[in-house]
Image (cartoon, rainbow, N blue to C red):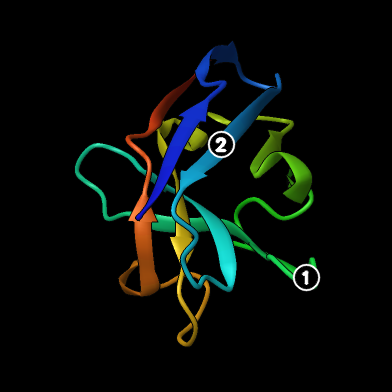
Amino acid sequence: AVQLVESGGGSVQAGGSLRLSCAASGAAVSRSHMGWFRQAPGKEREGVAAIDISGGTTYYADSVKGRFTISQDNAKSTMYLQMNSLKLEDTAMYYCAAKTYGGVWSDPAYYIGWGQGTQVTVSS
């Protein structure tokens, strides 16, 4: 199974930036995309962004388009999420995950491996 470890979370003021990293290791598994999800207290887990591992096509939730950028370094087996112009509503636990083939990028049911999460807190 693939192991995923997130890092880079923290506390930042509104308008600030953070860069999350997700390092993958372990046995190779068939996956088509890597994605970032977030979950705020009392809310469902939602897809933030995803990237096609082979082609590099990216996908974003409407709420983060133009502010967040997902990228990958396949040589390092690492994925990144650059978050700019952070808003209070971006506060959540952020998870990286590996997606199997099929389904839509934002559906967590199609993700077969999850990290333990990294907290992002945006304050005014």
Q: Above or below — where is 66 with respect to 8?
A: below
For the point 35% across and 65% down, the residue is: 112
Residue 92 point in image, percent of width and height: 39, 34
First in residue order: circle 1 vs circle 2 = 2
Residue 5 point in image, percent of width and height: 45, 33
Element type where label 1 sits in the image: loop
Residue underneath mark 2 = 23
Closer-to-camera residue (101/51): 101
Closer-to-camera residue (84/51): 51
| Kind of residue sitting beneath label 1 | Thr
Quadrant assignment for the N terminus: bottom left
For the point 48% across and 36% down, the residue is: 89
Q: How many marks?
A: 2
| Kind of residue sitting beneath label 2 | Ala
Residue underneath mark 1 = 57
Residue 10 point in image, percent of width and height: 50, 14
Quadrant assignment for the C terminus: top right
- Give me the disc on residue 49: none
Residue 67 visible, this orientation: no
Residue 102 point in image, percent of width and height: 48, 87
Q: Above or below — where is 68 with respect to 10?
A: below
For the point 25% across and 49% down, the residue is: 43
In this rendering, which labeled residue sits more in front, label 1 or label 2?
2
Q: CA distance from mark 1 to mark 2?
A: 19 Å
Q: Are marks 1 and 2 in contact (CB under 8 Å)?
A: no
Residue 53 in the figure: left or right of residue 9: right
For the point 48% across and 31% down, the residue is: 6
Q: Above or below — where is 27 with respect to 103?
A: above
Residue 63 visible, this orientation: yes
User: Label 2 crowding class (10 Å Cα cut-off): few <14, some 14-19, many 20+?
Assistant: some
Residue 64 in the figure: left or right of residue 10: right
Q: Above or below — where is 46 with respect to 32?
A: above
